[in-house]
Amino acid sequence: MHEAAITQALIDQIRQAMPEGATLATCRIDVGELEHLDTLVMDTMWRAMTADTPLDGADLVIQHVPVRVRCGGCGAEFHPEDHAILICPRCHAVSPELLAGTGVLLRSLDVDTQDETKPDRAT
């Protein structure tokens, strides 16, 4: 189950990026179709791994990125029906260049910060 390892790596990356004292509201990630991640399992892992931590209660929003390929022969871009068969539908060449659909990318964090340095008011 690589969802656990990916979720832990994501949490580690978020902790490094978070300002001290900030609260995470939402984490948005892009997940390539070729990663074969089960989003329900990933959401469950997220809830379990962030429980009782500063990230507890934050939403994980997963955006799926479909596979997109460019043919090295004719330059046509296409979305293959079968990810194991990357034959160009135009020229039938087998020289694919993957353009999208792989990897996991931390897209954005919605963070609430509390400004503890409010100016004193003298009267």
Image (spheres, rainbow, N blue to C red):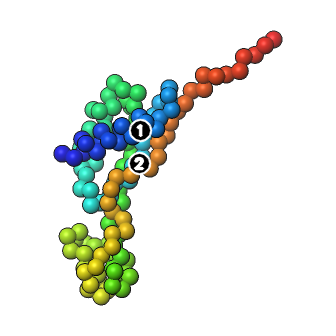
The answer to which image quadrant residue 122 occupies is top right
Q: Secondary structure at mark 1?
A: helix
- Residue 24 is marked as none
* Amino acid beneath label 1: Ile
Image position of 108 with respect to 25: above or below: below
In the image, taking residue 50 as reference, residue 120 lies left or right, namely: right
Residue of label 2: 106
Quick check: can you spot residue 25?
Answer: no
Estimate the x, y position of residue 61 in percent, counting from the top left.
39, 46
**Which comes before the other along the chain, label 1 or label 2?**
1
Circles 1 and 2: CB atoms closer than 8 Å = yes
Q: Residue at x 32, y 28 (%)?
A: 51
**Label 2 crowding class (10 Å Cα cut-off): few <14, some 14-19, many 20+?**
some
Estimate the x, y position of residue 85 in percent, counting from the top left.
21, 74
Q: Secondary structure at mark 2?
A: strand
Q: Quadrant of the C terminus?
A: top right
Residue of label 1: 14
Estimate the x, y position of residue 68 in percent, counting from the top left.
35, 69
